Amino acid sequence: MAATGTPAVDGWFTTGPQPALLGSRCTTCGTVFFPRAAGFCRNPACAGEEFEETELSRRGTVWSYTDAQYQPPPPYVPRTDPYEPFALAAVELPEGLVVLGQVADGYGVADLRVGAEVELVVETLYADEAGERTTWRWKPVAEMGEEADQ
Amino acid sequence: MSGSKDVAVLGVGMHPWGKWGRPFVEYGVHAARAALADSGVDWRDVDLVVGGETVRNGYGGYVAGATFAQALGWNGARVATSYAACATGAQALDTARARILAGMCEVALVVGADTTPQGFLAPNAGERWDDPDWLRFRLLGMTNPAYFALYARRRMDLYGATPEDFARVKVKNARHGLENPHARYRKEVTVEDVLTSAVVSDPLHLLDICATSDGAAAVVLTSTDYARRRGVSSPVRINAISTVTPTFPNTVLDMPNLSTDSSLVAGAPERTFKESIGQAAYEEAGIDPADVDLAEVYDLSTALELDWMEDLQLCKRGEAEALLRAGETAIGGRIPVNPSGGLACFGEAVPAQALAQVCEVAWQLRGQAGGRQVESARVGITANQGLFGHGSSVLLSI
């Protein structure tokens, strides 16, 4: 289910039913960067200076994972009081890079393993005076037979 | 062992690690005076001072070299200041080495000192939407221990490591540190102590993760000619200092980044960043990993010590746990790791830590490490990695 609210950071991901991270592709060498690149291509073999926006794959495999059992310090904005721990995953995408993200609500380290498939979702990160702020998260993809409705 | 690019470690000194809460300059001067006394060199004969910068202590910290020089009493020496995150001390040492080898100075004093805040290391204040070190907290709540936990978890899922293995690293290092008068924590720890301490970031417990500490370390570095003229014919020598940056694409997720480079177009490099740090030191020195007698590595977490053993080619990938379990990385084993007690017993004092590693190796090679002495040690290596593509490895021999 897509979250309502505005992204906590501008231009890093799309919202809607099929949300995706927004990266940059160097128009000279084709290397993809996330977060988006600007100015000069960081591939040392490339002199490129132009980039086009590209949506990254919505699915990837878990490179590693952990959780935050203590409340992180500012500028982290806690969503609940008292604090509730959340999980984090680093996910390898078909574009050849690993992207960190929190893990979707309702999932913890017990639901993850290195190499498992996850999918990008957009959920609420925190709320401030302007309303709910959303972010990208990684959600475990249910394996065959795990969910009765599949 | 000797080579034309060697420099001599004539003196080393430290201020004990702790949470003393005093100005970092005080610790730095204490360590500097200890290193000078150890070397027998008069402060007025030092012709270069290099300071390891600390970023949390205001003006004096940003110009560390001059701050220490003034506190020791202006002596007209040239001055330099380095900042390279956890590799700061090694970069400062490399600056001194380069000027010595270029014939531009003969006697250098290298000093690193820090006074640290309590708790998690957090980014500087203010909204900084273009700074990954700020964004990782705001968008992810990603603390340093969470990065360490990602690496630890990979060892579990890929190589079968267990939380007990990680605890064994702590137990070993705690035992080593008992014999180190400069260590902050000098207390035996059991596997059960580690496993019953709170989980900070799964699978790492509180006792798997190093603290932050106040401390200072200093090295008197000279040309081998100068050492010989002073009657020191076989000093501890620095054979190599590696401060290489990563090679694109950097495919291992590094603190404080939110992502890695993509390897799809450029292809993954032959070695990861951490592997390349040690390899560059071995190549520069012409020393084989099999010749290393002891290693001081950056155990920001227990599990990271195991990663470093493999990154430094002390064993094959995935085999560090087997060496640990067999006791081979303890003093008396085949390749003692962190005989000083490591960060587990020290806690991290960033600009001093890489120098502290060098101090320990120097004492070991001179046979002056007391109850934690590694027998007949001839070659020692240090390694660390920090933020923003910084890392270092120093190879020493006698």
Image (cartoon, coloured by chain):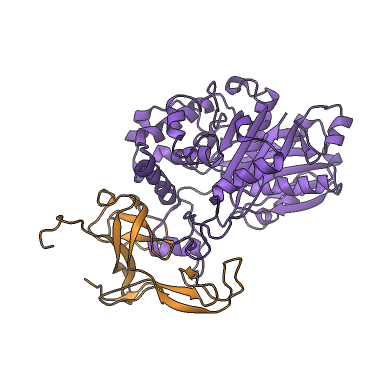
Q: What is the x, y in percent for residue B30?
A: 69, 37
Classify the position of the C terminus of chain A by image quarter. Answer: bottom left
Nearest to the observer: residue B223 or residue B5: B5
Chain in orange colour? A
B21 relative to B263, above or below: above
Nearest to the observer: residue A51 or residue B35: A51
Task: Classify residue B200 by image quadrant.
Answer: top left
Residue at 75% in and 46% down: B71
B81 relative to B209, above or below: below
Classify the position of the N terminus of chain A by image quarter. Answer: bottom left
Residue at 63% in and 38% down: B356
Q: Is residue A89 left or right of residue B300?
A: left
Task: Give the residue furthest to the right.
Answer: B229
Q: What is the x, y in percent for residue B246?
A: 58, 55
Q: What is the x, y in percent for residue A106?
A: 22, 58
Residue at 36% in and 61% down: A101
Q: What is the x, y in percent for residue B335?
A: 55, 28
Nearest to the observer: residue A123 or residue A33: A33
B51 relative to B340, above or below: below
Chain in purple colour? B
Residue at 72% in and 53% down: B81
